[in-house]
């Protein structure tokens, strides 16, 4: 139950029993993500001072090596998740292979797998536009007591037990779900506390925003071209507005609040699209569905796809239910 002025810490404790494997571990895991997000937020906020503090690859006046923020975010999340005896494996957009965590006693008895995009939309940092972190959580499928294997990471998105994102925007927010709807918490930076600001978020069933990098139009499949023309047609409540930030987290966040569709299709150049199934599309699809929206590759539900490789890409259509259904109709008929 959402309460006024509730902090994320209080919310996690009060809703712990809702989680079917309730042992407190998942709550502790979300807690560590909350902590890492504060550290990354602090660093992202300083990005504009790069000329003063030193750019990536340089050494600053304190003698510290300056890292690219995506590498920094990756390290902070990995460190924070590793030390807590909850996570047995991490896979990240920034790592070639998955990381095995054996735990302090080397018994491999931690249960959770985390997959993440530590900094999404990183090309927007230089121009002071919102970026984010995306995370996805599964229970391991191989027996505890043995090292994790690739099988633990290549689970279909429908097996997720939790997923969420942090958006480092005009305000910093954590939005996440453990399978009981989606809740959003806003950071009060003065005291370092997240407050429940967006309880029980719902994707409007319809919307009037379409988000796609239309610069690639000529390379789009015919179905997407046809759908874009439909969005632009003067009829009913159309034409829709075009809004594209180029940060998936921010585009998704806006569309979930206002109603809209985000599309990153396959193109002639990238036959599988650009976005990563495990680090980007699955967690966003899980959140979309938890909020009453939907997510598809144009033909089938994202969460049903059986992954075959860690870094696999997939075309992505995500947003208001009726808009995704319409786009699928155009894909089907083209
Ligand atoms: P990342 O910064 O993690 O590599 O992700 C960037 C992604 C996503 O956030 C965004 O929606 C998309 O790339 C933008 O791609 P285009 O510049 O090709 O439109
Ligand atoms: Mn990304
Ligand atoms: Mn990234």
Image (spheres, rainbow, N blue to C red):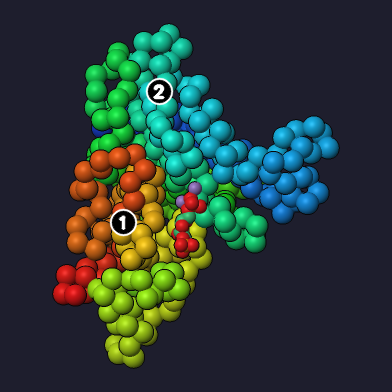
- Residue located 31% across and 34% down the image: 153
- Residue located 72% across and 46% down the image: 55
Left or right of 141? Residue 217 is right
Residue identified by numbered label 1? 272
- Residue located 27% across and 36% down the image: 154
As drawn, which residue projects farthest toward the front?
269
State the quadrant of the N terminus. Answer: top left
Left or right of 113? Residue 156 is left
Residue identified by numbered label 2? 100
Give the alpha-carbon distance from disc 1 to disc 2, as whole Å: 28 Å
Of the numbered discs 1 and 2, the one sitting upstream in the chain is 2
Describe the element under mark 2 as helix, strand or loop: strand
Left or right of 4? Residue 282 is left
Describe the element under mark 1 as helix, strand or loop: loop
- Residue located 41% across and 32% down the image: 97
Q: In the image, residue 116 lies at what x, y percent?
A: 43, 40
Q: In the image, residue 198 lies at what x, y percent?
A: 45, 55
């Amino acid at each position: 139950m959402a309460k006024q002025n509730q902090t994320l810490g209080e919310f996690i404790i009060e809703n712990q029993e809702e989680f079917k494997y309730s042992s407190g571990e998942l709550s502790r895991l979300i807690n560590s993500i909350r902590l890492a997000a504060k550290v990354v937020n602090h660093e992202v906020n300083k990005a504009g001072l790069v000329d003063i503090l030193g750019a990536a690859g340089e050494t600053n006046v304190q003698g510290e090596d300056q890292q690219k923020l995506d590498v920094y975010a990756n390290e902070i999340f990995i460190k924070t998740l590793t030390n807590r005896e909850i996570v047995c494996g991490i896979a990240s957009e920034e790592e070639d292979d998955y990381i095995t965590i054996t735990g302090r006693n080397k018994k491999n008895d931690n249960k959770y797998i985390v997959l993440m995009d530590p900094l999404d939309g990183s090309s927007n940092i230089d121009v002071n536009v919102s970026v984010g972190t995306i995370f996805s959580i599964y229970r391991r499928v191989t027996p505890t007591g043995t090292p994790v294997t690739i099988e633990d990471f290549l689970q279909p998105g429908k097996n997720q037990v939790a997923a969420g994102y942090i958006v480092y925007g005009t305000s910093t927010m954590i939005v996440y779900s453990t399978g009981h709807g989606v809740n959003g918490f806003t950071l009060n930076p003065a005291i370092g506390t997240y407050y429940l600001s967006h309880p029980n978020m719902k994707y409007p069933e319809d919307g009037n925003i379409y988000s796609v990098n239309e610069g690639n139009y000529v390379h789009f499949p015919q179905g997407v071209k046809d759908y874009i023309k439909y969005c632009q047609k003067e009829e009913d409540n159309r034409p829709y507005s075009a809004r594209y930030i180029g940060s998936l987290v921010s585009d998704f966040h806006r569309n979930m609040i206002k109603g809209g569709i985000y599309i990153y299709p396959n193109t002639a150049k990238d036959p599988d699209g650009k976005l990563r199934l495990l680090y980007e599309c699955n967690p966003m699809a899980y959140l979309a569905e938890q909020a009453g929206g939907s997510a598809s590759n144009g033909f089938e539900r994202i969460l049903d796809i059986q992954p075959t490789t860690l870094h696999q890409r997939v075309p992505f259509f995500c947003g208001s239910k009726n808009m995704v259904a319409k786009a699928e109709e155009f894909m089907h008929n083209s």
